[in-house]
Amino acid sequence: MAEIVLEGITKRYPDGAVAVRDVDLTVADGEFVILVGPSGCGKSTTLNMIAGLEDITEGTLRIDGQVVNDKAPKDRDIAMVFQSYALYPHMTVRDNMGFALRLAKTDKAVVREKVEEAARILDLTDHLDRKPANLSGGQRQRVAMGRAIVRDPKAFLMDEPLSNLDAKLRVQMRTQISRLQQRLGTTTVYVTHDQTEAMTLGDRVVVMRGGVVQQVGTPQHLYDQ
Ligand code: ADP
Ligand code: ADP
C-alpha cells in the first residue's frame, strides 16, 4: 500500500514539447484514481513518470513520503500493467506470471503459491498450463495483471489495459478490475480515454487536458450533473 504525491510535476521532452505542466495530485493509500482525457493530454507521460520510465523535468514525486524522482523503476516497488500485454509467447501462463519472482530468486514453493493465488483471484486456475496464444484477449489481459499481482507491489499503474479488448470483454474486465480492487485494496492509478471506465472504476477521476489537470472529483460529482 502506498500514498503517491505529485508536486508541481512538469515534463518537457528533449524536443522541447511540454507534455505535462505543473501537476499536483495526491493519490491516497488504497485509492483507485483514474486519469482521463483525450489522446495527447499527458496521461501516459504522467503514469510513466510515476513508474520511473520517464524522467521528471520539474517537481517532486513522493511515494510514502519518500522522494523517488531519481529512483530506478525496480526500486519503486510499483507494478505497471500495459495496454499491450507483452506476455512471453513461449512460456505458459504459470511461467509468465511467476517470471519476475523467479528472476528475483524467490523460493520455488513461494512462487507457486503466489501464482496460484493470483490465478484464483483472476479466474485463471484452469489455464495455468496454457500458452498465451491459446487464450482469449481477456484471459491474456488477466495474465498481465497476474504478473503484477504476484509481486505484491505497493501500487498498480495501468495504462489503457482494456483498450485492445472488444466491447463485451471490456465490460467483463471492468467487473474483474473492480473485484480485484475491492479484494486487494492496492493503490492504483489507471489511465483511460474511455468515459465509461472513468465513471465506473475509480474512487476519483482526474481530468487532464493539454498537459494540465482540468478537474478532479468523484465520478458522481463529475458526471451526474
Ligand atoms: P496514446 O495511445 O497514449 O495516445 P500515442 O499513440 O500518442 O499514445 O503514442 C504512442 C507512443 O509514441 C508513446 O510511447 C509516446 O511516448 C510516443 N510518442 C507520442 N508522441 C510522440 C512525439 N511527438 N514524439 C515522440 N514520441 C512520441
Ligand atoms: P496521452 O497518454 O494522454 O495520450 P501522452 O502522455 O502520450 O498523452 O503525450 C502527451 C504529449 O506529449 C503529446 O503531445 C505527445 O505528442 C507528447 N509526447 C509523448 N511522448 C513523447 C516523446 N517521447 N517525445 C516527445 N513528445 C512526446
Image: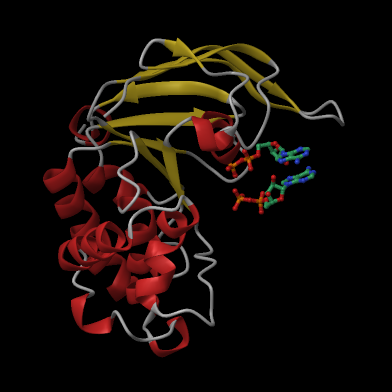
Q: Can you give x and y, in whole percent of width and height, for residue 219 in the image?
A: 23, 35
Q: Which of 207 and 164 is in front in this view?
A: 164
Q: Can you give x and y, in whole percent of width and height, for residue 159 in the image?
A: 48, 49
Residue 145 in which image quadrant: bottom left
Q: Nearer the viewer, residue 102 or 53?
A: 102
Q: Which residue is drawn at 54% across and 82% down?
A: 90
Q: Quadrant of the C terminus?
A: top left
Horizontal placement of 216 versus 116: left or right?
A: right
Q: In this view, does 86 lie above or below 100?
A: below
Task: Return the residue found at the far right.
Answer: 15
Q: Can you give x and y, in whole percent of width and height, for residue 190 in the image?
A: 39, 42
Q: Residue at x 24, y 46 (%)?
A: 201
Horizontal placement of 38 versus 145: left or right?
A: right
Note whether residue 166 is visible.
Answer: no
Note whether residue 145 is visible.
Answer: yes
Q: Residue at x 59, y 46 (%)?
A: 39
Q: In which quarter of the image is the N terminus?
A: top left
Q: Which residue is drawn at 32% across and 44% down?
A: 198
Residue 107 in which image quadrant: bottom left
Q: Can you give x and y, in whole percent of width and height, for residue 81 in the image?
A: 44, 52
Labels in figure, total: 0
